[in-house]
Image (cartoon, rainbow, N blue to C red):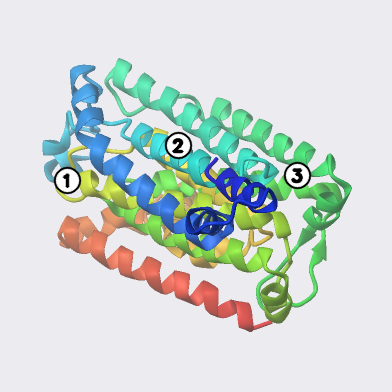
């Protein structure tokens, strides 16, 4: 919205009104300036309204249900004290991201609306899931079948969005693989790719959200990294030099990514150990969906496996645990997702969190390094 101050300054200059104030408005055309402002705005919104949201969630009795002692005896001993901590704190992240993005992003950009609508859509699914958990006072929410069906619907929406523009659809059908120069042509199988990215990312972040600040900290790193990738993808000389797809419209996604990074940092203020609020599925599904949507729009879907390495490890540990138990009757880990395995191995919760944050930073740097290995 504030981008229009730049267009106003251009109109005033053409009309002959030339002064320092009018010239200063020229700064609103720059994505870098607006991205930094979006991050700061989202951070401050979370900081300023965090207490208000927490008090409201407590008054509504939206406390986090904890699995019973009979279900997970050892984990209950570690996390039993967290029972009743308000959940659905993801509404704070969603509000900060949406308001900050609308304020600082260029509203005529189609990618901006595609990503924001996708984020709100998955946030809505997560909110309903959280509400059912709170209402039934157990850790079960909506059925996996319904969740998957809604995620399929979102993937179909992505497909229709790209098909509606011939130039976008031509590029959307390509799968760019890290370390390789030539893309793989997907055709209409692009729908399957979108579905895998959306389902995989949203569920992986959801699984990571099991310790205080773990998902928020890792999401900050991934969001900031994809903010840089979006900016490079939109800059033709840089994209050509790095031999990555040039997506001019993706530049505005830098603003959204930095808004998400700022919101996650602001939320971390309240969510750090010991957490005063949990993001719940409202936040984790929305964050994962937003990161997946940005990865699709920037044509860096597979790079998300590297940049979001912590999310991949968390989701992979669950898959391996289930597969092993069903096939052999034995468990690979003491408990999955893997952050619980380390807890049950004697690591303190804060130790697990910080070490996973470090891993997230390293994965992000590794992902950026692959841009020159083509």
Helix, strand or loop status at disc 2: helix
Which disc number belongs to residue 191?
Answer: 3
Helix, strand or loop status at disc 1: helix
Residue 225 visible in rendering: yes
What is the CA distance from the residue labelled 2 to the residue labelled 3? 30 Å
Residue corresponding to mark 2: 99
What is the CA distance from the residue labelled 2 to the residue labelled 1? 41 Å
Q: Residue at x 67, y 45 (%)?
A: 109
Percent x, y of residue 67: 25, 33
- Up/down of 170 relative to 287, above or below: below
Percent x, y of residue 300: 64, 62
* N-terminal label among 2 and 1: 1
Q: Residue at x 65, y 73 (%)?
A: 178
The quadrant of the rendering that contains the N terminus is: top right
- Up/down of 41 relative to 81, above or below: below
* N-terminal label among 3 and 1: 1
Residue corresponding to mark 1: 74
Task: For marks 2 and 1, give the one nearer the viewer.
Answer: 2
- Up/down of 312 relative to 157, above or below: below
Percent x, y of residue 14: 70, 52
């Amino acid at each position: 919205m504030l981008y229009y101050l730049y267009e106003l300054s251009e109109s005033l200059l053409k009309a002959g009104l030339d002064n320092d104030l009018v010239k200063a408005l020229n700064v609103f055309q720059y994505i870098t300036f607006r991205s930094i402002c979006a991050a700061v705005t989202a951070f401050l919104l979370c900081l300023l309204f965090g207490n208000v949201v927490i008090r409201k969630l407590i008054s509504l009795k939206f406390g986090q249900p904890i699995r019973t002692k009979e279900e997970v005896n050892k984990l209950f001993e570690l996390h039993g004290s967290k029972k009743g901590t308000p959940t659905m704190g993801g509404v704070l992240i969603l509000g900060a991201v949406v308001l900050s993005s609308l304020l600082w992003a260029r509203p005529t950009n189609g990618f901006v609306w595609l990503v924001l609508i996708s984020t709100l859509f998955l946030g809505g699914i997560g909110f309903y899931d959280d509400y059912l958990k709170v209402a039934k006072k157990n850790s079960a929410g909506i059925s996996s079948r319904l969740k998957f069906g809604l995620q399929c619907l979102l993937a179909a929406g992505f497909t229709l969005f790209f098909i509606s523009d011939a130039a976008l659809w031509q590029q959307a059908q390509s799968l760019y693989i890290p370390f390789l120069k030539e893309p793989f042509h997907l055709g209409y199988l692009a729908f399957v790719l979108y579905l895998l990215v959306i389902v995989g990312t949203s569920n992986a972040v959801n699984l990571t959200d099991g310790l205080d600040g773990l998902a928020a900290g890792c999401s900050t790193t991934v969001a900031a990294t994809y903010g840089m990738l979006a900016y490079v993808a939109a800059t033709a000389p840089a994209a050509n030099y790095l031999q990555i797809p040039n997506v001019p419209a993706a530049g505005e996604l830098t603003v959204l990514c930095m808004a998400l990074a700022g919101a996650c940092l602001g939320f971390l203020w309240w969510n750090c150990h010991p957490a005063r609020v949990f993001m719940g599925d409202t936040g984790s599904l929305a964050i994962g969906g937003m990161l997946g949507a940005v990865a699709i729009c920037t044509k860096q879907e597979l790079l998300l496996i590297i940049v979001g390495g912590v999310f991949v490890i968390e989701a992979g540990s669950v898959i391996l645990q289930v597969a092993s138990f069903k096939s052999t009757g034995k468990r690979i880990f003491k408990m999955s997702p893997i952050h619980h395995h380390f807890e049950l191995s004697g690591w303190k919760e804060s130790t697990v969190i910080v070490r996973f944050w470090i891993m997230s930073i390293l994965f992000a740097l590794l992902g950026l390094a692959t841009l020159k290995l083509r």
